[in-house]
Image (cartoon, rainbow, N blue to C red):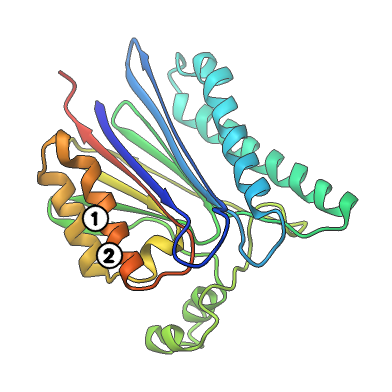
């Protein structure tokens, strides 16, 4: 499996700093190409959000460079990857929480990471940064937000329509670094050569509909490589025209048959 990748990050129309951090790492191995992609979105209501998000991305990049060559040779590489990446996320959480406590400040970040290797994927996420997959004309949201409204919907105390209008849709129930307890969600699956993944911060999806997201992924699936990057830029331009105030970040990963 090989991959086309594209990314974009934009401060948006209101904020002075960009608290989003992005990562794309690829490495050729004897068994194919390994890819790690992630977006960490510093919590906007807390100080040092950019410190938290950049620390998370830095730690994941370090894992890719130092740990990947060790376990990628194992037959049970997926379990090894899951265990070691979970350890990175938890260690970063502990490090940021301890930093926050010692300095009497508040910080936090979301994270959504995607690891691809040998026709399989691993997703680990905390917060409301999302991972979508488009495959054979169908779009699926692979992650579930760790937010107040999602919790209320799951419990049957709020409808989707009520959630859209309650004004509390961006309140997180957990993130990296902010509170003592943090439980990441984990998902694994198989990849087709027609699969396209989208990782995006909430600023990218706040102002677009699911139908528009699906159409964006469809265009990415049908385009040639030389205009692949332009699709994300066009979408961000639209989002900013609609007045999105949050930072805007997104990653595309398109899976293609190895030549």
- 134 with respect to 252 (left or right): left
Seen as rendered, the residue at the extreme top is 30
- Residue on which the image places disc 1: 234
Q: Can residue 60 be spotted in the picture? A: yes
Please state the horizontal and vertical placement of residue 45, each as a whole percent of the image: 65, 67
51 w.r.t. 248: above or below: above
User: Which residue appears at 41% of the width and 69% of the height?
Assistant: 244
The label on residue 175 is none
Please state the horizontal and vertical placement of residue 115, each as a whole percent of the image: 42, 35
Between 251 and 150, the residue placed more toward the observer is: 251
- 54 with respect to 149 (left or right): right
Tags 2 and 1 in contact by the CB under 8 Å rule? Answer: yes
Please state the horizontal and vertical placement of residue 52, each as a whole percent of the image: 66, 48
- 49 with respect to 15 (left or right): right
Q: Could you say whether the residue bearing mark 1 is in a helix, strand or loop?
A: helix
Quadrant the N terminus occupies: top left
Q: Number of callouts in the render?
A: 2
Q: Can residue 194 be spotted in the picture? A: no
22 w.r.t. 79: above or below: below
Please state the horizontal and vertical placement of residue 204, each as a whole percent of the image: 38, 61
Question: Would you call the spot at circle 2 few (<14 residues within 10 Å), some (14-19), or many (20 or more)?
Answer: some
Q: Could you say whether the residue bearing mark 2 is in a helix, strand or loop?
A: helix
Question: Would you call the spot at circle 1 few (<14 residues within 10 Å), some (14-19), or many (20 or more)?
Answer: few
User: Which residue appears at 55% of the width and 29% of the height?
Assistant: 61
76 w.r.t. 135: above or below: above
Between 30 and 154, the residue placed more toward the observer is: 30
Residue 190: quarter of image: top left
Quadrant the C terminus occupies: top left
- Residue on which the image places disc 2: 238
User: Which residue appears at 33% of the width and 73% of the height?
Assistant: 242
Q: CA distance from mark 2 to mark 1?
A: 6 Å
């Amino acid at each position: 499996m090989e991959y086309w990748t594209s990314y974009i990050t934009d401060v948006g129309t209101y904020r002075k700093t960009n608290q989003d951090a992005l990562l794309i790492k690829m490495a050729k191995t004897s068994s194919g190409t390994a890819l790690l992609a992630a977006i960490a979105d510093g919590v906007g209501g807390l100080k040092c959000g950019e410190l938290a998000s950049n620390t998370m991305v830095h730690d994941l990049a370090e894992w890719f460079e130092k740990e990947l060559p060790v376990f990628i040779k194992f037959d049970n590489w997926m379990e090894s990857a899951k265990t070691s990446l979970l350890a990175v996320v938890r260690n970063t959480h502990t490090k940021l929480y301890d930093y926050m406590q010692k300095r009497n400040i508040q910080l936090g970040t979301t994270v959504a990471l995607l690891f691809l290797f040998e026709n399989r994927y691993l997703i680990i996420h905390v917060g409301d940064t999302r991972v979508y997959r488009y495959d054979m004309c169908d779009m699926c949201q692979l992650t579930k937000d760790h937010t107040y409204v999602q919790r209320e919907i799951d419990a049957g105390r709020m409808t989707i329509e009520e959630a859209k209008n309650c004004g509390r849709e961006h309140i997180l129930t957990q993130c990296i670094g902010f509170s003592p307890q943090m439980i990441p969600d984990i998902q694994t699956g198989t990849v087709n050569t027609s699969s396209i993944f989208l990782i995006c911060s909430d600023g990218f999806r706040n102002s677009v509909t699911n139908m528009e997201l699906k159409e964006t992924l469809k265009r990415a699936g049908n385009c040639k490589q030389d205009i692949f990057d332009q699709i994300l830029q066009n979408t961000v331009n639209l989002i900013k025209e609609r007045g999105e105030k949050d930072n805007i970040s997104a990653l595309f990963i398109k899976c293609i048959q190895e030549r």
